[in-house]
Image (tube, rainbow, N blue to C red):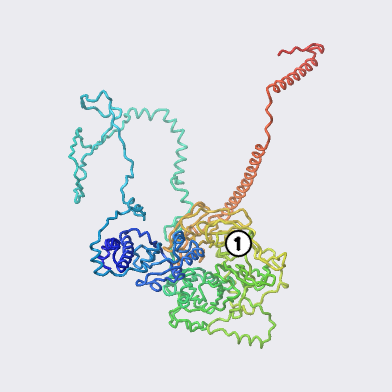
Amino acid sequence: MSTRDSSRSPSRASRASSRGSKGKDKKTGSTKRKAKHSAKKHEDSAASTSSGHPEYIVPLVLTSKTQEIFSCRTDEDVTYENPFKLLKKEDVLSDLKNRAAVSDFSPFKSIITEYPGEELLLVFDRDFIYGQNFYLVVTEEAKESMLQPPEPITDEEEKDEDFEDFTYVPPVPRPWISLGSELEVEEEMVEESQTKIKFMISRVHREFGSRVTFSDYNASDVKDGYMECASYQDKRFNVKPKERDTGIQVVPLLQEQSTQTKWTYPRNACTQYVPREFTEEQKRECLSSKSLKDFINSVSLRLEMALQQNEILNAFVDDWKALCEQESTFGGKSDSHLKEYQSFTDHRFGKEKTISCISWHPALHGLVAVSLAERLSLEDRVNISSKLILKPSLILIWSLNDPIHPQLMLECPDDIYCFQFSPSDPNIIAGGCINGQVVLWDISAYYELLTAKNGVTKNTSKVGYCPRTTLEPKASNDPPLVRYCAVSSIEHGHREVITDIHWLPDLFEITRAGYPYENKSGYCVQLVTCSPDWYVGRCSVWGVPCRISFALSVMFWDIRSNKLNTQTPASKKQEENQRDVPFGVPDTFKHLDLVWRPLLKTSIPKTDAGGEFSPIKISLREEHHSCRTADKLQTQVKEEKSGGGIHYSGLRATSAKNTKMLEDINTSYFAGTEDGELLYTDWKMEKDGDSGRLISAKPTQRHVVHDGLVHTVQRSPFLKDFLLTVGGWNFAIWKEGVTSGPILQSCCTQQRYTAAHWSLSRPGVFFIGKEDGNVDIWDLLEKTHEPSQTQNISAAAVTYIKPWIVSARQHLLAVADDSGSLHVLEIPWTLHHPSANESSGVLHYLDREVSHLEYYEQRKTFRAAEKRALELKDHRTKTETTPPVKSKEQLEEEISREYTAYLALENAVLTGLGIRKENEELTVKT
């Protein structure tokens, strides 16, 4: 219908209603026009309310879930041509009952409940005329007018309606509905933010209308006067303005006049004096006087001694600077900052990756290995898992002599998050994957390549026993690709990422129950891993199968073969044929590949409730540290002694019957969890009193100090009883055996800590990396409340820190960042050279902190007992009954009895002294 028709609809409806005497056809047309007038009235009211909506509709938003439930999907069930959908009232009420507040009809529950009809009309608002994608018709009249629109009006009816009388209906005011526009108006309003300053000027009443006289006076003579500092032109400066910003505003004409005395330009003046001297006669008298001779004779000895001391010793030399030698060269003793020695970045394989772990080669100096991992969350890793298969997971071995090309590339089944060289055989590397598998590599075939003087050998064919696989690049300048020898069984290993790995020392080995025994082989053959994983298993309770979940977070592995040497040569040959290793892969650990199972599985159960802790890092008491050059020399001697190589497939686990159990080995260890907790527990299994099976021991200590993930748990390489833990925004130092808490705890920093490591040469120094790329250097002998110095290393977050001792004069610090770059820094002389008795000084300081902690706990216990005693005393005071109040007569009677007793005592004393006779009467005056 056109706009002209819609504007005339009210008049036509009114004229049609007045003609009631016409025929039946006219009545029918009048009824249709009334319906059309009602519909047009709704449309006009909708068009007239730009900011609101008509009273007979309710705009609402229907989510895709609700559209599927009521079959009203946009552009499918309802379209622009057919926007209507009838909903049953009972279906809407059922949806409100089932989904409650989640239902899209919940804001209009009362309107739907009071609706008189059985079906509700839902209209699809594609153009968002009323602000939402749907609107609900809440009256029966509006529903009928929309579903059954009136028929078009003919020209004859229009002519009849033109003559109808028009009745004016005044508009009815409706309440104003706020849609938030008043807030915008209030925000645009200008309000005075500062309070106005009010002045009150008063005058004595008798002075009103009096004559005013002005006179000059001195400002300094008046009590409330002021001194004016007028400006003057300085002749020394003559600046011509080249650009001037001037504003002009229409203001009343003002005139200001002032009078001031003439200012004179100040001038500099100087005065010179001449010393007054004695005359020649006075000089002769003074020199010949006896007093001067006596004075010279009295001080001559002291003067000679002072002159001799000045010749022997310079009194103006700074003794503190003389304590140390001054060196101004690079890396000298006076330099205290970390200097960048080398930087490594692999743009081919390390692009968009982070460095998760660093390890220095224990035998070949100048070689450092780093593991690369994707910088992805778990959700992103799952989404692009198909693309990650095409990207290789590698461990790169760099040389300080060649910062461009890596020396070796170790192939990994998945991203490696921790790895370590074997202390007894540096050619063996063990690592932990993100999928929970333990991987072993053997790089003994590339020993000559790594020991070459030049970092990269141009012709690798000179190494005759260095095999080349099809996976290695054909170009001679590309680094060799080493495939892993063995990988653990994925069914019997960890379920989550392996976060820490340690080789057990070659002094002992453990059994399946966790007891330490003597290691007769003299090699490191066992390692321990930890992971915050959970297992889901099945069990049967009273014959009903059920599922249980438990954590096996710490596992011990043995790289030796568990089979006994009772096989025949034919069976051995058959087994070797069945397990043929690929070409170019060493067969060092072919007996472990894909069938390697952990020797011991332990967990850390919670003491107060069910469940287990999730450890991230662990620290054993017996660990390998390269603290001094002598230790490294011993390692080299051991390697030369075992130059023939180790046949791990021929080694067998030592029987517990033939060896003795070591009682002096401490089987307890510290563990840091992902919730910021530090635990102290034992890996030895215990027998359950009810079932008799072996279970993991519960932790004896649990402390919550850190407010984030504990990523560093490390013992001091000099003081084995002391431990450093770093997590969240603080760090703490602990002592083994002290159960009350940390002996030293730092304040929270503005940036989160991400990595830390003890110094290998100074007992009181450790390095901490932060997420802003800075490295804090802490020296406990210098400062304990703040780091000694902070130095920026990278723009990305620091992910790992690993120091190393190259020689007695050169100490290096490897720092990895989140962008995949490795920075090798040279530690200055002041940070790696220990002072005299530094170890004893640090030990003395930490022992004082232990004593202070014990004193604090004693005072805490004492104050708690004192508080309980005071509370008990107050309680007794409140519960005790108050004595009854005596009357005045009772008090007088009590005083009279006491006075009578006093007189009797006095009489007995006086009688005994013979002052008073026995028959003498006492007179009492009251």
Residue for point 54% across, 82% down: 585
Above or below for 757 versus 654: above
Residue 923, percent across and down?
75, 12
Which of the two residues, 229 or 695, is positioned nearer the viewer here? 695
Which of the two residues, 863 or 828, is positioned nearer the viewer here? 863
Residue 653, percent across and down?
67, 75
Residue 615, percent across and down?
58, 64
Figure quadrant of residue 147: bottom left
Q: Is residue 379 left or right of residue 164?
A: right
Q: Is residue 367 visible?
A: no
Tally of numbered discs: 1
Q: Which residue is mark 1?
A: 670
Above or below for 524 versus 327: below
Q: Is residue 666 visible?
A: yes
Residue 184, percent across and down?
33, 53
Which of the two residues, 55 or 807, is positioned nearer the viewer here? 55
Which of the two residues, 705 or 204, is positioned nearer the viewer here? 204
Q: Residue furthest right?
A: 919
Mark 1: give few (<14), some (14-19) or many (20+) Cα within 10 Å.
Answer: many
Residue for point 74% across, 13% down: 924
Above or below for 421 versus 840: below
Q: Is residue 717 left or right of residue 826?
A: right
Q: Quadrant of the N terminus?
A: bottom left
Q: Is residue 289 left or right of residue 526?
A: left
Q: Quadrant of the C terminus?
A: top right
Above or below for 715 versus 367: above
Q: Is disc 1 placed on a helix, strand or loop?
A: strand
What kind of residue is marked 1? Answer: Phe
